[in-house]
């Protein structure tokens, strides 16, 4: 009996050891696999690929459930999403392209401005991406945050080819919407009319069009209202610079090591490099442009390719209407004339570049800003500033509000740096036209938040949402406008998106420190006018003492809210003052500066009462001022807020 017990114990021990060994092996295998996946997800140089040319589907139908116009990443995402949700989908190109990916693969914007979740890392230290879904599917096929444009284009095409519900129509000469009568006096898109590559015309019907063009071409043609450039902050002629990306050859592994050594060893937190991306060389902003009225260099954004070449995003070209084909041609000419001089400058001033040569310029321009659609909801800078969630969230932003230079004399600015905010579905639904959704940088954002929301991961998430919305609108016999107003329908859309790889959950973040100031309402007013910026650290300096000169600058900038009302000159308030930039600002001096700007001819000592009498200064604002002889920035912002509430409520 004892011998049987001993044998039983022995067998049990062997079984336990065997089980333990299996568990250890499984854990080790999982660890190795996780590490392999981690290594694969890290930025890396891959093998060069042959470009796969995208061709039109042989037979195009007369009708589709969904038509997606535009083959930029947002359009690719929208088409894939619609197809996966059972919609027969036509993806149409109107820019004579032979690959998919647009801005990223032909504009050569090969470094992605990522959106990361605040304070969240995986076990292996990888930051969590906010917009997953189809964006992540594509991102996992490329080299990293900078990618090879050929492998990126092939990855887009691979995703599209996998969907039997997608037909492709490439290289059309023109695309215009066909309009009918919609609900409540709105127009309704009933299809598109195209001129094909061979010159033949074709009418193609649909109940849903997704405009994924860079400039919102379809929505503009359909009669949707929009603003242009910085029009909404009082400067219609101003728009961010366009860039012509160029490619350098002879960027060998040794050259890249030298780039990494410089940028990772210069003790500047604003520069750096990994295996595929480099950012720095800030001194290039001092490059003496040949065409100094139209061109300015900034520090380099370098994206490494798989064939010992690298793409340079740094040349800024000004006064270009990016939606005008003739202006785009002009920008190409200006850029191509300047770039050889830039490369010579780089070769002479940086040893690592002495053997590089100019290879080619991008086939398309990087255009940052043109039309801003007016939709059912317009994303505001306050939404971004306050990290605001939305009940109808379809994407998340977190990238800093980056307003690039508007002219050679402008430095550009980072307005603020959000942690996370939501893009509402209502921002994809245009006013006045049914049967249409707009995704990407032309969606319904004010110009300032557009500086953050214009990035590719946000646009691809919007595209994925638009594809699902097309399915639901058809099944429910609802217009997109009706769907956007239905909490039940939107919740169903979000549920489908979550099941298909997105993570669209409500969130709440602690209020930013600056939001706790009593002058925060003033900050919101001046930031919405584009008058102040907090940079990457949200340093708005509300407590900092102002001065007489700064008040003049602030008031002059405020004129944009109603130029017809501001008939005077704010600078006359400091006439005869020896050092206005060092002179403390009193409430009376601040009031006088405003009355002078308004053309209200009253003496300084009467200026405050004049503003109160005209409803332009409230007792509530005066009550927030602690030292009326030495106003802070926050105090002056509150005064501008009072004026704005009257002139531009």
Image (cartoon, helix red, strand yellow):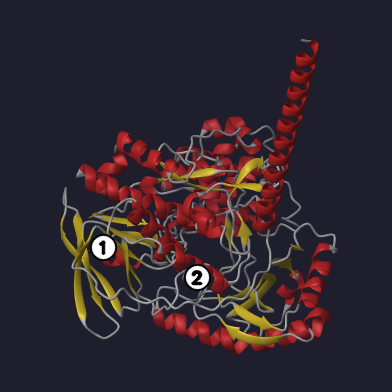
Q: Residue at x 64, y 74 (%)?
A: 305
Q: Is residue 599 visible?
A: no
Q: Residue at x 78, y 57 (%)?
A: 269
Measured along the vertical axis of the image, is residue 503 above or below residue 193?
Answer: above
Q: Is residue 169 visible?
A: yes
Measured along the vertical axis of the image, is residue 643 above or below residue 313?
Answer: above
Q: Position of residue 513 (x, y in %)?
A: 66, 36
The quarter in which the C terminus is drawn is top left
Number of labelled discs? 2
Q: Position of residue 471 (x, y in %)?
A: 28, 49
Residue named by callout 2: 154
Q: Residue at x 31, y 78 (%)?
A: 172
**In the visual, does 524 lie left or right of 301?**
left
Residue named by callout 1: 223
Q: Secondary structure at mark 1?
A: loop
Q: Position of residue 91 (x, y in %)?
A: 33, 66
Disc 1 vs disc 2: which is toward the camera?
Answer: 2
């Amino acid at each position: 009996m004892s011998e049987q017990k001993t044998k039983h114990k022995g067998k049990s021990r062997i079984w336990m050891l065997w089980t333990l060994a299996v568990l250890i092996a499984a854990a080790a295998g999982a660890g190795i696999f996780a590490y392999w996946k981690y290594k694969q997800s890290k930025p890396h140089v891959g093998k060069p690929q042959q470009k796969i040319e995208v061709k039109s589907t042989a037979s195009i139908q007369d009708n589709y459930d969904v038509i997606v116009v535009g083959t930029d990443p947002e359009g690719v995402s929208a088409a894939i999403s619609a197809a996966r949700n059972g919609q027969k989908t036509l993806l149409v190109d109107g820019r004579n392209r032979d690959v998919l990916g647009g801005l990223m693969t032909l504009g050569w914007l090969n470094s992605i401005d990522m959106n990361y979740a605040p304070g969240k890392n995986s076990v292996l230290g990888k930051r969590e991406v906010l917009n997953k879904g189809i964006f992540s599917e594509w991102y996992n096929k490329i080299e990293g945050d900078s990618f090879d444009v050929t492998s990126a284009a092939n990855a887009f095409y691979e995703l599209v080819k996998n969907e039997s519900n997608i037909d492709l129509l490439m290289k059309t000469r023109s695309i215009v919407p066909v309009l009918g009568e919609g609900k409540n006096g709105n127009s309704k898109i009933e299809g598109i009319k195209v001129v094909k590559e061979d010159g033949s015309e074709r009418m193609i019907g649909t109940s849903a069009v997704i405009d994924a063009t860079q400039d919102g071409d379809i929505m503009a043609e359909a009669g949707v209202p929009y603003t242009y450039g910085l029009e909404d902050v009082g400067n219609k002629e101003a728009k961010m610079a366009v860039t012509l990306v160029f490619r350098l050859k002879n960027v060998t592994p040794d050259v890249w090591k030298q780039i990494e050594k410089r940028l990772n060893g210069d003790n500047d937190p604003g520069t750096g490099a990994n295996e595929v991306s480099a950012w720095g060389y800030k001194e290039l902003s001092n490059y003496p442009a040949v065409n100094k009225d139209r061109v300015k260099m900034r520090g380099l954004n370098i994206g490494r390719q798989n064939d010992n070449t690298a793409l340079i995003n740094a040349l800024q070209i000004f006064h270009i209407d990016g939606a005008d084909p003739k202006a785009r041609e002009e920008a190409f000419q200006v850029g191509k004339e300047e770039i050889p001089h830039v490369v010579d400058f780089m070769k002479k001033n940086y040893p690592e570049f002495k053997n590089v040569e100019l290879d080619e310029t991008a086939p398309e321009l990087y255009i940052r800003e043109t039309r801003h659609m007016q939709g059912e909801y317009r994303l505001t800078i306050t939404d971004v500033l306050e990290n605001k969630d939305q009940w109808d969230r379809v994407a998340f932003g977190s990238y800093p509000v980056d307003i690039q230079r508007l002219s050679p004399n402008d430095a550009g600015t980072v307005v603020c740096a959000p942690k996370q905010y939501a893009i509402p579905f209502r921002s994809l639904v245009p006013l006045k036209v049914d049967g249409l959704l707009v995704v990407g940088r032309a969606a319904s954002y004010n110009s300032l938040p557009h500086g953050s929301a214009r990035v590719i991961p946000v646009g691809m998430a919007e595209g994925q949402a638009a594809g699902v919305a097309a399915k639901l609108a058809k099944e429910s016999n609802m217009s997109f406008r009706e769907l956007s107003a239905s909490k039940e329908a939107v919740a169903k859309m979000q549920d489908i998106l979550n099941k298909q790889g997105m993570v669209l959950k409500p969130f709440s973040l602690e209020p930013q420190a600056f939001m706790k100031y009593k002058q925060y309402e003033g900050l919101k007013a001046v930031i919405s006018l584009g008058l102040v910026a907090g940079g990457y650290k949200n340093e708005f300096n509300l407590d900092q003492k102002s001065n007489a000169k700064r008040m003049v600058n602030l008031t002059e900038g405020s004129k944009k809210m109603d130029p017809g009302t501001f008939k005077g000159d704010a600078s006359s308030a400091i006439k005869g003052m020896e050092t206005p930039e060092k002179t403390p600002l009193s409430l009376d001096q601040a009031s006088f500066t405003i009355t002078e700007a308004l053309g209200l001819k009253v003496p300084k000592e009467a200026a405050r009462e004049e503003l109160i009498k005209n409803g332009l200064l409230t007792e509530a604002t005066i009550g927030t001022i602690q030292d009326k002889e030495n106003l802070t920035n926050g105090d002056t912002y509150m005064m501008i807020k009072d004026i704005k509430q009257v002139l531009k409520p």
